[in-house]
Amino acid sequence: MAVISRGFGGRRRESDPNLPPGQYLTEDFPVLSAGPTPRIETSEWSFGIRDENGAVASWTWDELHALSVEDVHTDIHCVTRWSKLGTNWRGVSLDTLLSEIDTGASYAMAHSYGGYTTNIPLDDLLGGKAWIASEFEGEPLDPEHGGPARLIVPHLYFWKSAKWVRGLTLMDDDAPGFWEQNGYNMHGDPWTEERYW
Ligand SMILES: Nc1nc2c(c(=O)[nH]1)N[C@H]1C(S)=C(S)[C@@H](COP(=O)(O)O)O[C@H]1N2
Ligand SMILES: [Mo]
């Protein structure tokens, strides 16, 4: 007899069409950090984008949040195989920020307070696919989850969503970030299981 357990989270696990291959559903929000949680006051925080010629545009916390802040409803997928469906964030779209930059670059390196880096093609940051998020489920983002603000690029594995993000460096050529230097994929599409090299 087929038994569908509704005890642990109450969802049908393998058959959910929103679940990429090789992933399982979780209802918790695991914390995955390669180092200690940096504590950054919003008064000290800024976000900068450096273009391929070295010109920098930057926003303070207040300047960033004076821009249009969007509600984002999305699924997230970690390469360690958990997925969490239907999460709610608020943040500023990378479309909004990159519209102020005149660039011919094709790649970006995201940099975080604490030193984490991850590389992302610029096309994956444009078109309503990436945000600088500062709220999760109606609350300010917890420091453990990247607060005061993190990058979210939810259509890629979640290691691309740099916590405590402080800026992007735009690049003509791709280069590996922290996990990518350690064998993770340069792109990271969960639907085609771009997990490792
Ligand atoms: N700065 C920074 N960002 C990071 C990480 C990290 O170690 N440092 N871990 C990445 C990984 S591997 C994952 S799965 C997600 C985890 O986010 P969470 O801790 O909010 O679940 O953050 C990503 N962003
Ligand atoms: Mo991860």
Image (cartoon, rainbow, N blue to C red):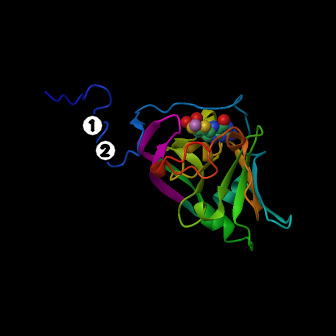
The circle drawn on residue 16 is 2
**In this rendering, would 42 be left or right of 56?**
left
**What amino acid is at disc 1?**
Arg
Q: Amino acid at mark 2?
A: Asp
- Circle 1 packing at 10 Å, graded few (<14), some (14-19), many (20+), is few
Quadrant position of the N terminus in the picture = top left
Q: Please state which of residues 149 and 35 is positioned toward the viewer in this rendering.
A: 35
Going by the image, does 103 lie left or right of 91?
Answer: right
Does the segment drawn in magenta span residue 75? yes
Which of the 4 image quarters holds residue 4? top left
Where on the picture, by quarter, is residue 168?
A: bottom right
Residue for point 28% across, 42% down: 15
Q: In the image, what residue occupies the spot 59% across and 32% down?
A: 32
Q: Which residues are magenta?
A: 70-87
Left/right placement of residue 2 relative to residue 29 reads: left
Instruction: Tell me the residue at 43%/40% (across/down).
Output: 84
Query: In this orientation, which residue lies closer to the viewer: 27 or 109?
Result: 109
Q: Residue at x 40, y 33 (%)?
A: 27
Determine which residue is flagged by label 1: 12
Can residue 67 be spotted in the picture? no
Please, is residue 138 above or below residue 2 in the view?
below
